[in-house]
Image (tube, grey):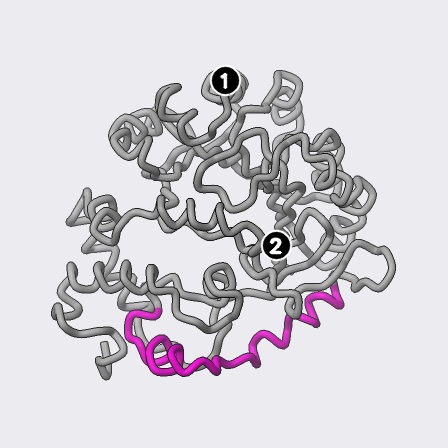
Amino acid sequence: MGHLDIELTERCNNDCIHCCINRPAGDAEAQAREMTTDQVGNILRQASDLGCMLVRFTGGEPLVRADFEELYLNARRLGMKVLLFTNACLITPHLADLFTRIPPLEPIEITVYGMCRESYEAVTRSPGSFASFQHGVNLLLERRVPFIVKSALLPPNRNEIDAFEAWAKTIPWMTGPPGYSMLFDLRNRRDDADRNRLIKSLRPSPEEVLAVLTRDEPAYRRDMAEFAAKFMGPAGDKLFACGAGHGMCIDAYGRAQPCMGIRMPELTCDVTGVGSYLSLREALDFFDRLSRLHAANPAYLRRCAVCILKGLCEQCPAKSWGEHGNLDTPVEYLCEVAHAQARYLGWLVEEKYGWEIDGF
C-alpha cells in the first residue's frame, strides 16, 4: 500500500465559496459521526502493516479536530511521513513547536486565498481569517518548519497572481512556481445542489484557464510537448486507467474510497471496525475490481473512449460522479477546457474534436 489519505473531518473554520467539503466547524452532528481517535489509530496501524509510509491528513480543515496532535504523533510513531493539507489559520505556537520537534518529513501544504484581507475573506467568508492565516504562516517561518503554498484562483483574487507568485518565491522551500486550483470539483457527496450551482458559477471559462496556463508561453509549449509524448491518445472503454485503488482515501466517517472523488456507495466500504466492516487489506481487494469496470454510456464510448485528448482532459469516473452521479457521463466543462488547449497548441483545427481524429 503506497499511500493513505484520511479526511479527518468535513468541518472547517472557513466557508470558502468554491469548496466542495466544508461543514461548519461547530457542526455537532458531523462531529459526532466522525471516526474516533482510536478508530483512526487502528486504521493507521493497519496501513503501516501493509507497508504504507505516507499518510495525508486533509479535510475540511484537519486542525479543527481536538485530537489532531494525538493522531499526528500516532502516525509519526509508526514511521509514517505526514502530509498535512491546511489553511494555516489554526496553527498555534504549540503546533508549530510540535512540527519543529517532530517534523512531518513532508512540507506542509498551505492553500492561500488572497494576498490582502479583502480578497482573502471574500473567498473564505470568515472574518479575521486573513490575520489568522498570516499568523500561522509566520509561526512556521520563525521555526523554519518546511511548507509550500498553492492557491485557488477565484474572482476575488484573480488579479493577484503576480503578487502571490512574488511572495511564494520568498518561501525557502518553494522549488518552483505554486500550483493553482481552477477547475473546481462539485460536492461529490451530491447532497447540496445550491453549493454545486455556486461552484459551477465560479469556474473560469476555457479562455481564462488558457490565459493562466500560458503566462509563460514558451515553458507551457515545452511542457505540453513533453506531456503529449507520454500521455496523449485514446483510453478505450476501460474506466479506471489511473492508480485508483492502489492507495485509498478514508472519509471522516470511516468509509474507504478508491480515491478522494469517488463516493459512489457501491464502490466504498466501511473500515471503522464497527459492525459489518472490512479491514484495509480487504478494502484493497475490494477495490481491485475497478480495473475490470468498463464504460457503458454511449456518449462516453462515442467520445471519451476514442478521443486523442483523453490524457489532457481531466475526465475520470470521479469527475463524472461529482457532476452526474455515475461513472461514465462526459463532463462538458472539462472537455471544453481540453479542446481549448489543444486548439491553442495547434493540435486540432477549430472545427474538429479529439474523438474525430484517428491518431495523435
Residue 266 place in picture, x, y as percent: 66, 70
Residue 245 shows in the view: yes
Res 344 quadrant in image = bottom left
Amino acid marked by disc 2: His
Q: Is residue 341 magenta?
A: no
Q: Nearer the viewer, residue 183 or 135?
A: 183
Amino acid marked by disc 1: Gly
Residue beneath disc 1 = 128
Using the image, determine if residue 289 lies above or below residue 112: below
Q: Residue at x 34, y 38 (%)?
A: 154
Res 202 quadrant in image = top left
Using the image, determine if residue 297 lies above or below residue 321: below
Q: Nearer the viewer, residue 90 or 226?
A: 90
Q: Residue at x 64, y 50 (%)?
A: 53
Q: Residue at x 48, y 42 (%)?
A: 19
Residue beneath disc 2 = 3
Element under label 2? loop
Q: Earlier in the sequence, mark 2 or mark 1?
A: 2
